[in-house]
Structure formats: C-alpha cells, structure tokens
Image (cartoon, rainbow, N blue to C red):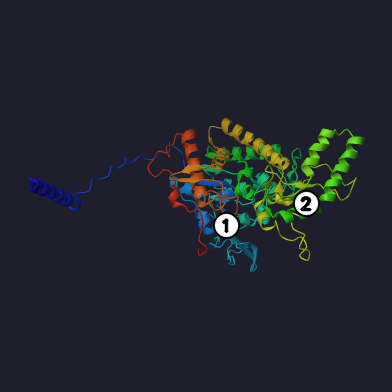
Amino acid sequence: MNTYKYLGLFLLSLSIVSCDVNNELDAIPAELAAEVALNTNGLDFSKYVSIGASFTAGYTDGAMFKAAQENSFPNILAGKFGTEFKQPLMKDNIGGLVFGGSAVQPPRFYFNGAGPARLPAMPTTELTAVLSGPFNNFGAPGAKSFHLGVPGYGQLNPYFGRMASSPTATVMGDALAQNPTFFTLSEIGGNDVLGYALSGGSGVDQTGNFDPSSYGSNDITDPNVFASVFSTMVTALTANGAKGVVANVPYITNLANFTTVPYNPVPLDAATASFVSNAYAAYNGGIQQAFAYLVAVSPMTQEMADAEIAKRTISFAAGQNAVVIMDEDLTDLTAINSGLISMRQATADDLLLLAGSAFIGTLANPNNPGSINGVAVPLGDQWVLTPQEQLAIRTATDAYNTTIAAIAALNPNIALVDFKGVLAEASTGIKFDRYTLNTKLVTGGLISLDGVHLTARGYALMANKILAAMDAEFGTNFTTATGGLAKAGDYPTNYSPTLR
C-alpha cells in the first residue's frame, strides 16, 4: 500500500518537473495597446518659433552647450510637432564662451562626487563667431522682458549676439521675421526678478519707475513696464493669426539655489560657542542701551524695542548655529553708536544663496584666524534673501502673473501653462512617468547643478506640461496620442564629465 503511494507521488513529481522544464511552449502574446493617432486639430506647426530666456535656450548646469540645447523644451516640442527646428548650437559640450582665446563664460558644472564643480576644460565657442540663420529658437539667457525689444541687444548679450541677424537687431524683430505659425513665449518675467534674487536683494525694487533704461542689472522690473512689454509681444505674435502658449512665472525662491544652504550651517562645540558669544557681548549690550534711548526720546514703544533687541541679540551654543548676516531693514543705530551695525543671526525665514556655501567659514582676513565669515564677520547682503526681499520678489511675480493670465484669458489664440503651479508641486515631489522629481540640488532630478535651471528631464516635463495645456485649449490630443509626450527615461538628469 505504501509502495503504491510513494510510486504515485514519484510519478506526480516527475510530471511537475517535466512541466517546469518544458521550454517548447509558445509564449503568451502580450496585449498590445491600440495606437492612438495624433490629432492636431488644425494647428499649423510649419513654422514654430520659441521666444524666451535661458529655459527656452536649454541652459543647464550653469552653461550653454550642444547636448543641453538639443534637450531644450522647444526642441522636444518641435519633435512632437514633426517640424524642422533650427537652434544656434554651441561648438562643444564643454559650455562657456571664449573671446580672443580667453574664456569669458565658464564651462558647465558636473557632479564630482561631492557637489557641483566646474568642468576642467577650455570652452571652444568663440563669442564673435556669428552664426547663419534663420533660427527657430530665440532663447536669450539673461534677458529681461524689456530687453527683447531693445535694438542692438546682441552687443549686450553674447548669446543673442551670436545669432542676431544684424548688429542692430532685436530678439522680437528676428523672431517675427520668421512669420511664425505657432510660438511659445516662456519665462518672460523670470529674469525681471531673478537678478535681484541672485544678488541677495542688493538691487532695487523699481516698482513705480517706468523707465527701464535707468534700471540696474539686479533691479526688479516695474509691473506696469512688464505689462506693456508682454502685451505688445503677444499682440505682435498673434497679429497674423498665429497661435501659441504662454507660461506664467514660478516663485523662483522655490529653486534649489535658495533652499539648499541651511540658515544654521555653523557647527560649534561648547567652548568655541562660549568664546564667540563673549565676543558679541559689547554689541548685545550696546543694542539694549540704544533701544532704551530710542524708547525715551521717540515714538518707539518698549514692546517694539524688545522685539528688535531679541532679533538682534547674537549668541551661539554647542551644535548647529545660525550665521550672522547684515539686514538693512533693521533700525539704523549707527548715529547712536557707530559700532552698532545692522546685523543679526539668520532664521529659518531667511534664504541663503547656494554660492554662500563656499563662502561661509572662510576668513575675511587671511592673517586673522578669528575673522570667520558668517560667524565673526556678518555675511553681506549679497549672500542672503531676507523675508522683506522675498516679499518684493513675490509681489512682483504675482503682478506679472496677473498680467499673463489676463492676456491669455482674453485671447483665444493663446494657451496658458501654469509653471508656477508645477514648481510649487515639485517642491514636495512631482510624478513624471515612473520617476518622482523634486527641487533638491543634485538628487531631485528636476533642477540642474546651478540650482536655477532645469535638467534635461526637467525640460522634458516642461514640454509635456505645454502639450497638456495645448490639449486643454486647442483640442489637440498629445497627452493621449501614441508617442505624443516625452518620456522621462529618454532624458538625463546629469551629463558626464567625459562629454566634451
């Protein structure tokens, strides 16, 4: 009885093994998704032109270079549109520019295992070598809104200069000369606040000044100036019936350049913290005396005085400590005591610039080991954005976006893409195919190594958001058509240092 039982089990096991090793069975065919044809709903892409600044140009990792330009969002869009698209390509993948054999713009960043570093190579793109057009991509890195209509702007901006049709050409003039049938108008307004932000708010908020010729390079553009310029551009681009997409302006303070360096990057042991705190004892005491005087002789209340005394009192403890910064919005006490400069320790509400990471902790005086920048010596205005400076940026950005939204709403030939919303979502993570991108430096996948511009994958996401906006406004079907959207995996988040 047991013999038959075991024999049966043995035969059963043979049959199971036999099934397991049978490689002759036909594979079960995968179910193929039905192809969906692209429907452009009558849009004419025969002459697509892109107008903008560095994002439009494909700027990434702190430079312009060929591979980045080929991965620019306008070039990605042109591929989906099935149209020819000519760009003013750089000569190499090193990035940067040379003039007479000397580098005038540095090469691109690469990741050296610890952080962003400049590629140790000499650029080969000559600044004075003007290319032959016509071109489709009119992205001019660094351009503010009002620059796009300035005659001879190529003499001020080498990136436009190498593609300008003449020494007196304007960006908009050259773009309009192509008689575009479709266009994108992107990041107009971004540089109108970015220079101010990257200078730590050391520029001037020019709200109320309607003469942009009087502006400095780091100033915030007056919203009325912006509105006039933007309206004029859209009117010109749509005059002959062309359709296009305009983009609003993100809060640039969400970018990695302003969120990577913590406000408290200074590690101190207890003994060092006590020593440094004692060095500020005279300042702290002087602050209290000065505000006691102001309460006695001015309308300042004791409550107001106590609040600023608390803000300005400087002390350190064992562990991570806040840097000391200059803040011009503090009460000026130097008329009472010249030593009471407007400094305080940073808080979580302050934004330290990415460039400051290499400056904090260096010596203001190489011969004085105690002259540590950010500790014994306050950081200058150019290294930090205070809440008041952030508010100026946000207020201007909101005004620009109000104009952009209003013009888009009134013009049936215009679709609006919400890049402000995209960047806000990316701050905590935004899905792109099987990836989740965020705004963290190096690891986030969206922001390139310069902390401001996008990676190639980020530009592909940008292209897809534009295509989605077109579907919503013009009735196209890029988001559902087979191959209608860019695939995240086709675009890198960094470029190898061997790519030259």
> Hey, what amino acid is under mark 1?
Met
Could you tell me residue 202's position as x and y percent?
74, 48
Residue 276 against residue 92 in the figure, above or below: above
Residue 499 against residue 281 in the figure, above or below: below
Disc 1 and disc 2: Cα gap in Å? 46 Å
Q: Is residue 34 left or right of residue 455?
A: left
Residue 86 against residue 220 in the figure, above or below: below
Q: Is residue 150 visible?
A: no
Residue that numbered label 1 is attached to: 64
Could you tell me residue 450's position as x and y percent?
60, 54
Mark 2 lies on a secondary structure that is helix
Q: Quadrant of residue 186?
A: top right
Q: Is residue 375 visible?
A: yes
* Foreground disc of the pair 1, 2: 2
Residue that numbered label 2 is attached to: 277
Categorize mark 1 by other alpha carbons within 10 Å: few (<14), some (14-19), many (20+): many
> Hey, what amino acid is under mark 2?
Ser
Question: Which residue is nearer to you in this view: 313 or 90?
Answer: 313
Q: Residue furthest front?
A: 2
The residue lying at 57 percent from left, 31 percent from top is 409
| Label located before the other in sequence (1 or 2) | 1
